[in-house]
Image (cartoon, rainbow, N blue to C red):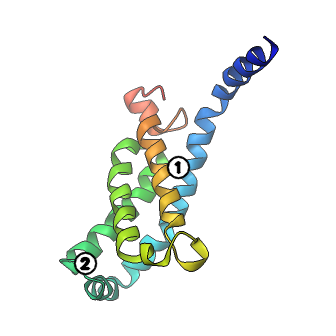
Amino acid sequence: MLLKKIYTELARLSEYGKSLSLLLARLVLAYGFYKPAMMKWNDIGSVAEWFGSIGIPFPTLNAYMAAGTEAIGVVLLTLGLLTRVISLPLIIVMIVAIVTVHLPHGFSAGANGFEIPLYYMLFLFILFTHGAGKFSVDRLLFKDKN
């Protein structure tokens, strides 16, 4: 069957792009977390006040935890270091952002909806399940073949 042969060959060839796609996903996510992390750190007091105003418990602690997780995430995702580990707390940050800020606005990113944090969560889940790829410190340290 010609279609089956074409599909099988395409699947085989696509494996060569796997590590490049994981690298690009890590870099795009790191870039996406950079500005929010820096904005939080530059005015952590205001972030804590805002967290309190939207009902987040222990707002100062949670402001530092969110800003710290995002900042550490930028570094680790860029390097591809402990990628599977950092993906989990970043997913939690996105869940909190969706529930506390974005959900009432619906799906659309243009209306400050949960579209973008959802995409971040999906990218992070892919990194959690597939690893950082060849172009990563994880590969050097842990011989992670994914």
Amino acid residing under circle 1: Arg
Q: Nearer the viewer, mark 1 or mark 2?
A: 2
Which residue occupies 34% across, 83% down? 47
Instruction: Write down the residue under mark 2.
Output: 56
Which residue occupies 48% across, 39% down? 132
Indicate the secondary structure of the residue bearing disc 2: loop
Q: Is residue 38 visible?
A: yes
129 relative to 93, above or below: above
Residue 141: x, y in percent? 39, 32
Instruction: Write down the residue under mark 1.
Output: 26
Tell me if 55 is positioned left or right of 74 in this view. Answer: left
How many marks the image carries: the answer is: 2
Tell me if 55 is positioned left or right of 34 in this view. Answer: left
Instruction: Name the quadrant containing residue 51.
Output: bottom left
Instruction: Name the quadrant containing residue 38.
Output: bottom left
Amino acid residing under circle 2: Ile
The front one of 109 and 48 is: 109
1 relative to 92, above or below: above
Residue 124: x, y in percent? 45, 50
Residue 127: x, y in percent? 46, 43
Marks 1 and 2, the one that precedes in the sequence: 1
Which residue occupies 32% across, 87% down? 50
State the residue lying farthest toward the right. Answer: 2
Tell me if 69 is positioned left or right of 136 in this view. Answer: left
Which residue occupies 43% across, 56% down? 75
**CB contact under 8 Å: marks 1 and 2:** no
